[in-house]
Amino acid sequence: METIQIFCENTSSLHDIRPGARLSELCKTIDHKCKYRALGAIVDNQLKELSYNVYSPHIIKFIDMSHPDGRRMYIRSLSFLAQRCALDLFPEHRLTFNYSLPSGLYGEIIEKKKGEDGKYKALRLSAEQVALLKSKMEEYVELDLPFIKKKLPKDIASSIFRENGYQAKAILAEESKQYFISTYYLDGYADTYYGPLLDSTGYLNLFDVIPYSNGFCLQAPSTSEPWKVADYKYQDKLNEIFKEHSEWNDILGIESLAHLNKAVSIGKTAPVIQIAEALHERKYANIADMIHNRRDQVKLVLIAGPSSSGKTTSSNRIAIQCRTLGINPIVIEMDNYFVSRDKTPLDENGEYDFESLYAMDLEFLNQQLNDILAGKEVELPKFDFVKGERIPSGRKIRMTEKDILIMEGIHALNKELTKDLDQSKLFRIYVSALTSLSLDENNVISTTDCRLLRRMVRDARTRGVSPEETILRWPSVRRGEEKNIFPFQENADVMFNSSLIFELPLLKYYAEPHLNRIPVTSPAYSESVRMLKFLSHITPLTPEEIVAVPPTSVLREFIGGSSIKY
């Protein structure tokens, strides 16, 4: 029999397979060297299901839960499983996923039709109902039912989604530029997920479903420890941000991406931008009010957040609001308190770990801050990154009653950073793009993707870093955030959600051309394809509409045109 040769990157060798063979067959016959069970494969730098049939030579790499695409496949499949099981338990309702939580996805059971107030009513789930949902999902895992993929004409797919109660999903299908929609079936129930799924429910043997707010949290395996479910931690401040986001969407009259696309298409972008920016301004003012109300006690404001969250703009705008209340902010740069290069800790690869807390001279930092807070005159340091050592700056400061210190950095929420200070004098702020409009009722756009788009646009514009390089560096950035920032976010006195409802249409205008230029031979290609796929459902802003974004907007930090100095 004639065979096809494929090169498997996992084994660094060639393999002969029959034409039309599924990737799952090859996966079973070779030692693919994945640390965990193989979930999918990168075929010529494109993500494919294990059901993919091979008819020509390819370069193939099998991926597992430790790979970002493998993890996304797992979560998409787990979401579909939850949706199918919710139908069994709540046949007159539908399941929606509203937000990404640090430990999973937040889901609710919603009525299929709007009430008299024009809103969808959600059931308040009991612990017993959540436990029933988990039990039903476990039954489906035990049955090992296949996820079946079909290409349906978009009008047929749309009618299926509408019948299932997913109006936003139906609209996106109708407005798609594709003739056919990839539709998945599980036990006779159809839906779409904007990326490949696993082979069957039997792969989903590690998850949890726990009560959260009015609904539940669907937990997948941990990012850092894929052999166990992510640790659960209810975060009150984060939950308040989600409530605030829903309230802001109600004010704007935009429930979904379909509604936003419509607003952009009919030329209603300007009022959306104006109201969204005004809501941000009110939040900045509220934070300044909180600081002012504690002005007799608070002397140091610490600000932290992950990459591309808009910390610099937010810090400046909070400082401006403080000035309107008679408070004079003095900015101290945390980067000037590094230890000398020869004392910098090393990571597991023997490289300098500049993101480690102990890359900071904690003793000297605490000593200087205590002296400043005690009213002493202090000369601030300056770190020479070329020599790798601290040098005098010549900048001396002494605090007055109207002054307040502001310091921004990745460790600002870690209490170990300021362990020798009087904690009552500190006010901590966490800034991040914490929410985003979902693609539809049960496909959440990761806020991590929003930050990646922000960084890609900014770095290409100001730092000479190609989008390809940004994508390839991103996993390392994410590991640093998981270790140094996210575990401490609930230490904040207040969280600021730097997301803006119009940012994806804005970022699409700038990011799409960059992503389209990444070549198919690049290791970043599969990620660019994924991002282009979800951007394809978004109606971009025009240059004329982008002019309406004010120069003080947090998004100007990334697209340019800001009136704030960085």
Image: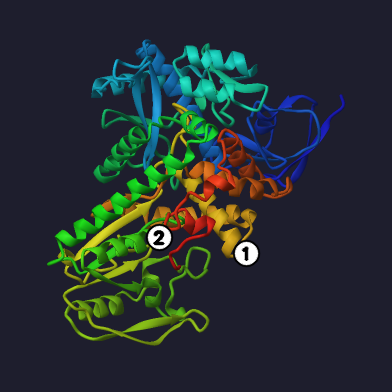
Q: Is residue 342 left or right of residue 153?
A: left
Is 154 above or below relative to 77? above
Label 2 neighbourhood size at 10 Å, few (<14), some (14-19), many (20+)? many
- Where residue 293 sits in the image (x, y, percent)? 15, 59
Viewer-nearest of discs 1 and 2 = 2
Give the residue type at disc 1.
Gly
Q: Quadrant of residue 297?
A: bottom left
Residue plotted at (34% across, 60% down)? 317
Question: Residue at image x 42%, y 23%?
Answer: 82
- Label 2 element class: helix
Q: Is residue 118 above or below residue 380?
A: above
* Apparent side of residue 324 relative to residue 431 in the rendered image (left or right): left
Q: To which residue does mark 2 refer?
A: 313
Front in this rendered view, residue 397 or 355: 397
Q: Amino acid at mark 2?
A: Thr
Q: Secondary structure at mark 1?
A: loop
> Which residue corresponds to mark 1?
464
